[in-house]
Amino acid sequence: MTRFDRIRDRAVGWSLLALGLAAGVVVPHPATTALWSASARAFRRAGDEAMVARLLSATKFGPRIRRGLAQPAAGTLYYGRAGLA
């Protein structure tokens, strides 16, 4: 993995985290949890396990994010059903 990929994945992780925080004001928690789970996936791709651990250690949303990480990503499901994966 090149350095650019890691920087891009971190930027995506922070963007999804901020989007989840902003959406948390008006959207119910399943949507914000999905955004934060996607953020944790991006941080994991970037190799930032410390940030993933911080997200998973949250008292209220940590277990929900952990369950979200256990599920396959939406893109994986889409391509799998299309027969492209």
Image: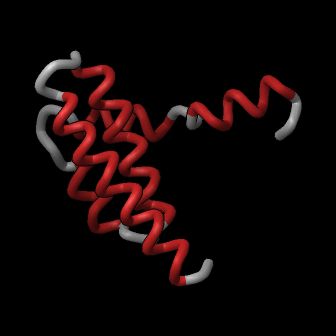
Relative to 21, 85 lies left or right:
right
Task: Looking at the picture, tell me which residue is in the foreground, 15 or 32.
Answer: 15
Percent across and percent down for residue 43 are 40, 60
Figure check: 23 above or below 43: above
Q: Quadrant of residue 20?
A: top left
User: What residue is at 59 percent from the left and 82 percent from the top?
Assistant: 2
Render colour scheme: secondary structure
Relative to 39, 1 lies left or right:
right
Figure check: 75 above or below 4: above
User: What residue is at 36 percent from the left and 55 percent from the top?
Assistant: 13
Percent across and percent down for residue 9 are 46, 63
Which image quarter holds the N terminus? Answer: bottom right
Q: Quadrant of residue 53?
A: bottom left
- Residue at the far right: name it: 83
- Residue at the far bottom: name it: 3
Figure check: 44 above or below 47: above
Which image quarter holds the C terminus? Answer: top right
Number of marks in the rendered image: 0
Relative to 53, 57 lies left or right:
left
Task: Looking at the picture, tell me which residue is in the foreground, 49 or 14.
Answer: 14
Percent across and percent down for residue 64 are 30, 31
Task: Looking at the picture, tell me which residue is in the foreground, 12 or 30.
Answer: 12
Q: Quadrant of residue 72?
A: top right
User: What residue is at 14 percent from the left and 32 percent from the top?
Assistant: 60
Percent across and percent down for residue 68 are 42, 33
User: What residue is at 22 percent from the left and 47 percent from the top?
Assistant: 18
